[in-house]
Image (cartoon, rainbow, N blue to C red):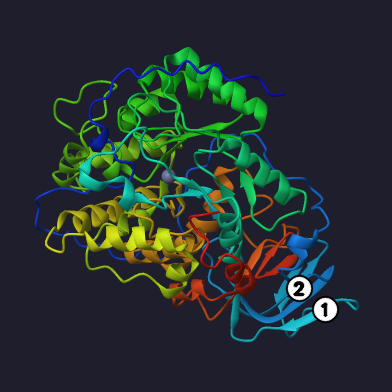
Amino acid sequence: MPRRLNSAARNRASRNRESAAACTVMIGMLTAVSPCPAAQAGQLRQAPPKAVAANAPAPHPATPGPEVAKFLAISAPRVVLRHVSVIDGSGAAPLADQTVIIADGRIAAIGPAATTPLPKDAELHDYRGYSILPGLVGMHDHLYYSASNALQRGGGTVLEPGVIVAEIAYTAPRLYLAAGVTTLRTTGSVEPYTDFKVHSRIEAGLMPGPHMDVTAPYLEGAPTYFAQMHELTDPEDARRLVDIWADYGATSFKAYMHLTRAELAAAAGEAHRRGFRITGHLCSVTWPEAVAAGIDDFEHGPVYTDSEFVGGKIPDVCPKAQELQASWVAEPIEGAKVAALIRLLVDHHIAVTSTLPVFELYVPGRPPPQRRTLEAMASGARESYLTERSMLDPNNPTPALLLHKEMAFERAFAAAGGLLLAGPDPTGNGGVLPGFGNQRELELLVEAGFTPLQAIQIGTQNGARFLGRDKDIGTLAPGKRADLVLVKGDPAAHIEDIENVEVVFKDGLGYDSRRLIDAVRGQVGIR
Ligand SMILES: [Zn+2]
């Protein structure tokens, strides 16, 4: 039941636009780089998530229309995958030489190939040398992309009306699915009507893409850096917007960098009243203040977003990015203050979403862009990305220091029982793409010190748990939804094999990854 937005946005301030960069600006003077913590064996312990409203898609998936059918490699109602290695997403060791039976969109059986009986009428596929794992649950998977940063940041200021990002409603869902993402949270919308349409078209079987938890438009204060964001006027405005977008169909909410503590508390209260959860990429509100306000999840980790250690922090005001980063450069991850923060998060069952790929973009000396990434980009987006990349200062050690600190925090948080989630955040300078970025996130978690099996668990079961859908998705077991990824190789031993996706099953239908990637070639950034 649509209602008119009461758009009472007023520019309350206009200072510091250039210091309020989203996930991007890296400035500092330090020279040391802290080492990554060593890997620890075993599965992750996690605090149980808070109760959450069910937001499962329709129980009976729609019949695939022509724009879905053309990407299907396997579509028989009963399918047997034989001789595969099974990584179940729980962190348990892989099982070699298994038979997986899929029937009517669900996993019917998993067992040793030698002893598991085969159904009579099933289509058989032998996949020796392949692994299957649960479909990825992407927890910071926007349907938009920063396609033209180089044009927008010239001279260090942002011209009116602010930074503009590009909705990529055609390419993003196809790329996410191609890379193995079968469920995602959009984690902030700039074109909500488009996001709702993409969600409904996918659920209707009219276009390929993952199941989606659609996040409402950002709950942002003033002054915002982005042309496409509303600026909240007061707590009542925040409450009203949560209500309006929940009525429209949003199932999650996201607070942003300049809202006030009172606005966050009002939004969180209303989201919870409606049965939904709220996450935040914060700055004006510190993490402990947000815990007090009732937040459920923090995006990006604290090293880039928690302003609590900035000296002289003014309440409800986002300090300069340089000040926030300097405060974390000075703060030892193994020290008492960070330990207290971790204890606060774990005690309140608050999740943290890791988005390491978007920060890697700003670290000089990291691996060059992959060919598949450059080929997927539209020419203007590619030029913008390569221009921005060329401007990295090879002599600035701070971006690497911050990335390693964030990695160390995520290890410590998970080791203390915190629920760590994973997503790519396809923004920054444009080098992280939907889907490919989800795979890169798992590789970077391994670089951070997690085992490949732990990284896969973070990218599958943990996201499902946060969404309250872990009984249905996120792990592989009989009765669960047949959302699974078939990859060549063994990502449990070599996490980079996660990139070798061949077939992605969603609701038991097997999508040809290559065909989906080919369909978006040269178009990421323009549609
Ligand atoms: Zn984001």
Q: Name the residue located 79 percent from the left edge and 62 percent from the top edge.
A: 66
Q: Position of residue 226 (x, y in %)?
A: 38, 35
Tell me if mark 1 has few (under 14), some (14-19) or many (20+) residues whose alpha carbon lies within 10 angstroms of its own: some
- Mark closer to the observer (2, 1): 2
Count of number-bearing discs:
2
Helix, strand or loop status at disc 1: strand
Quarter that holds the N terminus? top right
Query: Tag 1: residue type?
Result: Glu
Front residue of 462 and 406: 406
In the drawing, does residue 375 fall left or right of residue 37?
A: right
- For mark 2, what is the residue? 74
- Looking at the rendered structure, which numbered label has been put on residue 519? none
Front residue of 309 and 62: 62
Quarter that holds the C terminus? bottom right
Per the model, the C-alpha gap separating discs 2 and 1 is 9 Å
- Badge 2 vs badge 1, beta-carbon distance below 8 Å: yes
In the drawing, does residue 12 fall left or right of residue 133?
A: left
**Badge 2 or badge 1: first in the primary sequence:** 2
Tell me if mark 2 has few (under 14), some (14-19) or many (20+) residues whose alpha carbon lies within 10 angstroms of its own: some
Q: Position of residue 126 (x, y in %)?
A: 71, 85
Helix, strand or loop status at disc 2: strand
- For mark 1, what is the residue? 123
Q: Quadrant of ligand 1?
A: top left
Tell me if I can see residue 500 in this picture. yes
Q: Is residue 508 placed above or below 216 in the rendered structure?
A: below
Disc 2 under 8 Å from ligand 1? The reply is no
Q: Position of residue 59 (x, y in %)?
A: 79, 48
Disc 1 under 8 Å from ligand 1? The reply is no
Q: Quadrant of residue 235?
A: top left
Query: Tag 2: residue type?
Result: Ile
